Image (tube, rainbow, N blue to C red):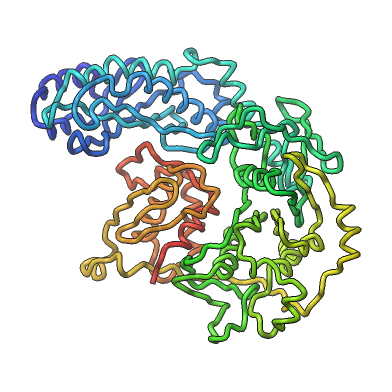
Amino acid sequence: MNTSTQLQTTLRSIHRKSYPAYKSLKGAYQFDRYVLSIDHVQGDPFASPSHISVKILHKDAGFPASYYEKKINKITLCDYLTRQFEQQVNHYTFRAKGSGKSGLISVSHCGQEVLERTACEITAKGITARFFIGFPANGRTINAPELEKILFEFLPVCVHKAFFYKSLNVKHLEQAIFLAEDQEYIRAQLAKRSLAAFVADGAVLPRESGISSRPMKNSVPFQSPETLRVSMELPHKGNITGMGVPTGITLIVGGGYHGKSTLLNALELGVYNHIAGDGREYVITDDSALKLRSEDGRFVKDVDISLFINDLPNKKDTRCFSTEDASGSTSQAAGIIEGIEAGSRLLLLDEDTSATNFMVRDSFMQKVIRREKEPITPFLERAGDLFEKCGISTVLVAGSSGAFFHIAHTIIQMDNYRPVDITASTKELCKEYPLTQGDVPAFVMPQSHRIMTRHEASRSSRARQDGPERLKVKVHGRDGFSLGKQEIDLRYIEQLADTEQTAALGLLLRYAVEHLVDGKRTLSEIVLYLDGQLKKAGLSFLSEGSGISCGYAMPRIQEIYSCFNRYRRS
């Protein structure tokens, strides 16, 4: 182990040398109660900043062991520390001067959701914090005094204020841990009480704007209808009441701008825990829930969509359906089957973003176009069996077709952001408007044995002979990434909460293509293997010995499936 004094000496010796001399700093150095590691040095001042990590032993950090013994507590503590560290480094970033990214100090920016990130990791030994520093230069000449200022003046203050228990607001941290334990308790109660979701009384569901996930000020607080109100005794907060969304088929209706989609959006992000003050802290959804929509032009490979689509005019086999350019209905059918494969127990749909002909066919249309001439069995006719035979619930926002009232077990009307249980009264009305019953094809649960293959266009001639080449991942925000020459479009994967989850999906797909895709393993086998590795070692297993950097967050298995299903393979 090198000392901080040795780092200082080396740093002064390379002052005014050409930028590549910074690479001599790579290594680990002992500072006051922490070890600073320079893991990767950028190639020039305009390149991606250098990767830095700090390691602190538990005996020095001083956090109660109960804060990192359980996984949920560990993730919450890491999230809290990352937020504290970001607050500190924001005071110092770019205070050291130079060209390009000189003086940058950055760490993951955490949103309203609590996610497991590589920015902070807790092991049996201690805490590891990862972040970026832009090593200062004048042009492409090393400016060592400015980097010395960062490493020996700015950084020690940030580390000691953010990662040592005695330096923090202990009560505030305790409240964050307690909140996470309460959220986990509610999540466990869902299955025990046959609930798909829970929305607490007093929750603030509307967001500040279309580009902000902060709660809207002066908005209408959520208030559960009495008929759906449930009470829970939380470990820390005590008694809490709210709306329990039962398993089965739940319909959300109401006039435009009354809060239907706002409620659905809260439910789709209720698969994650949220920070205090978000307004949705106690909006908890079955963590396997999957938001689905139609995706015109989507790539689909070897999916059994025969549950919804059969007898195509071109005689194409829908039990193993592939297309480079799916229609709205086929993309939505494939999405549901893929969601079932991913283990989702709850489907979330909005009529506005669904393919109309996939969702419902009214009685008049059925008389004009006979069933034998229509290859689509609409979702309306399958939702009941999905629940009764497979245990898969549905929450659906509807605004145009009354047919869904007939199959719904629970009907919620949103009235000025207030939910009203209209199940009983609507069911009486349904008797006056009977639903035309036709011959529905038999319900046969699709079976998936899809072999995952590699996209030939992304392989060089040498790679075809010697194995897969090293592919480059480039992230384009939250909406997708490129792997080699192929773009992976994730715009419609609406439960991706953070760009860092997209970045992690890029690493996971690259790892799969380079190490696991052999023409024999199924897509499910590959995803389940990756999920097992993530649970065992976290995202660090993707580093292959070189060390993982800051900038990645854990995706759910549902998003891993969704990403892999959109990889255009041969």
| Residue at the spot 67% in from the left edge and 40% down from the top edge | 284
Of 54 and 303, nearer the camera is 303
User: How many marks do you count on the picture?
Assistant: 0
From this viewpoint, is residue 442 visible? Answer: no
Residue 434 falls left or right of residue 489: right
| Residue at the spot 66% in from the left edge and 71% down from the top edge | 445
Note whether 310 is above or below 106 in the view shown: below
Q: Position of residue 120 (x, y in %)?
A: 43, 32
| Residue at the spot 19% in from the left edge and 33% down from the top edge | 45
Residue 439 falls left or right of residue 226: left
Of 523 and 220, nearer the camera is 220
Note whether 437 is above or below 232 in the view shown: below
Q: Position of residue 280 (x, y in %)?
A: 64, 35
Of 192 and 247, nearer the camera is 247
From this viewpoint, is residue 437 visible? Answer: yes
| Residue at the spot 39% in from the left edge and 29% down from the top edge | 129
Instruction: Place residue 435 in its image quadrant.
Output: bottom right
**On the rendered image, what quadrant is the C terminus found in?**
bottom left
Instruction: Place residue 3 in its image quadrant.
Output: top left
